[in-house]
Image (cartoon, rainbow, N blue to C red):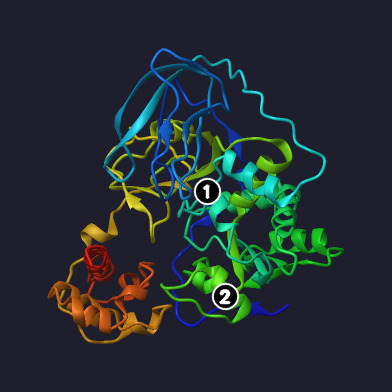
Amino acid sequence: MSVLTFKGGVHPYDGKELSKNMAVRKIEPGNEIVIPVSQHIGALALPTVEAGQRVLKGELIAKAQGFVSANIHSSVSGTVQKIEQRLSVNGSKVLSIIIENDNLYDTYQSKPVPETLTKEYIREAIKEAGVVGMGGACFPTHVKLTPKDDNAIEYVIVNAAECEPYITSDYRRLMEQPKEVMEGLKIILELFPNARGIIAVENNKPDVIENLKKLTENEEKIEVAALKTKYPQGSERHIIYAITKRKINSAMLPADAGCIVDNVDTVYNIYRAVKLGKPLTERIVTVSGDGVHSPCNLEVPFGTSHARLVEEAGGLKEGVEKILSGGPMMGQAMFTLDVPVTKGSSAFLAFQKDFVTHAHMTNCLNCGKCAQVCPEGLICAKLAQAADADDMEMFVRLYGMECIECGTCNYNCPANRNITQSVRTMKRKVQAARRKG
């Protein structure tokens, strides 16, 4: 089996040995559950409950507003205490539903699943369950699975690359529930009659690849693809290119190249939504890094405080300098543990040394090392110069809007320049200018 990849990328220390062999265990979320009504790209969900109301686990508590939005369900049973602004992982305040957990976990009874699964039922079940992209983007999945033309889709790719260092949540899902992921993929394939299913796994997970190959040996429309272990192999554009050699840009959707790409946990939750009628109320979170005593993989109800994750991992070591939500390449730095786990929370990482803070930035050396590793083939240093000079015209001319903000340029820069941050800021300015016409 050939190993598929793309041009560019980097090979950071992956740190996966810290948690990859730790089986997933469920945790109790604590007494106060904080559930933001925005856990997805698109319009905020509208609360459907009020203070003093008792809710059940799995009950709808905030309804999607518009097509690009997602339902929110309670992860526990208990009483709604208030609906107010609360801190989120990125430091902003988000309207949130505060529930006092009664620790009974009385479950809301969903509608029975029909024997025959029509396309309409599949899409509606996914929408009702509030399934979104679990790889971090949190794009509503029912929208992604509703392209202009079902017949034009030729590939359904299950993104199991998990190229971000330290994170092992998808690995554990495939080790512990591979059959359920397979069933989720088969459900997606029911929507697209001309599509093949590809489960794409980086080749640093040979045990997963071997298991999946055994499961798919009699499947005519499903196969396993081994990807070269390299960051950002899990990027949607680059996993599509690695498998199909088709290119997409910022003006295109994967469907324009005949592809649908979904994360492992997204596919697993499609199975739960369609076959079991279960809404999305929890996810696997990797807790790792050299700053925690006992790295682990936890099944966490949404709304659980990150402080509970740290407690389950044996606490933080003395002198921790950096905590992150997500991976070290694209994750968000955190300043408090008192924020909730949401649909996009793939990992919590703690490190004893903050290498970014301690790095000494110097002038650009014009060495070209950023361009050598950029997966989009951009001249990253020139983009940063245009951004720092507020030269929007030059930035656009140099294809700055094609940057995927993966951070490979920062990682490879010997001068420790904050290239990605400069480019990201300018991209937002260009987007704002375009919205104003």
Question: Of residues 101 and 212, which is closer to you in this image?
Answer: 101
Label placed on residue 132: 1
Which quarter of the image is occupied by the N terminus?
bottom right
Which quarter of the image is occupied by the C terminus?
bottom left
In-image side of 184 versus 301 (left or right): right
Residue most toward the left?
389
Q: Position of residue 113 (x, y in %)?
A: 75, 36
Q: Which kind of residue does numbered mark 2 sit on?
A: Ala
Q: Can residue 238 be seen by looking at this rendering? A: yes
Q: Residue at x 59, y 50 (%)?
A: 266
Structural crowding at the residue carrying mark 2, measured as other residues with C-alpha within 10 Å and reported as few (<14), some (14–19) or many (≥20): some
Q: Can residue 299 be seen by looking at this rendering? A: no
In terms of secondary structure, where does tag 2 sit?
helix
Which residue is disc 2 drawn over?
257
Label 2 and label 1: CA atoms lie apart by: 21 Å
Q: Which kind of residue does numbered mark 1 sit on?
A: Val
Question: Of residues 378 and 163, which is closer to you in this image?
Answer: 378
Q: Position of residue 86 (x, y in %)?
A: 30, 32
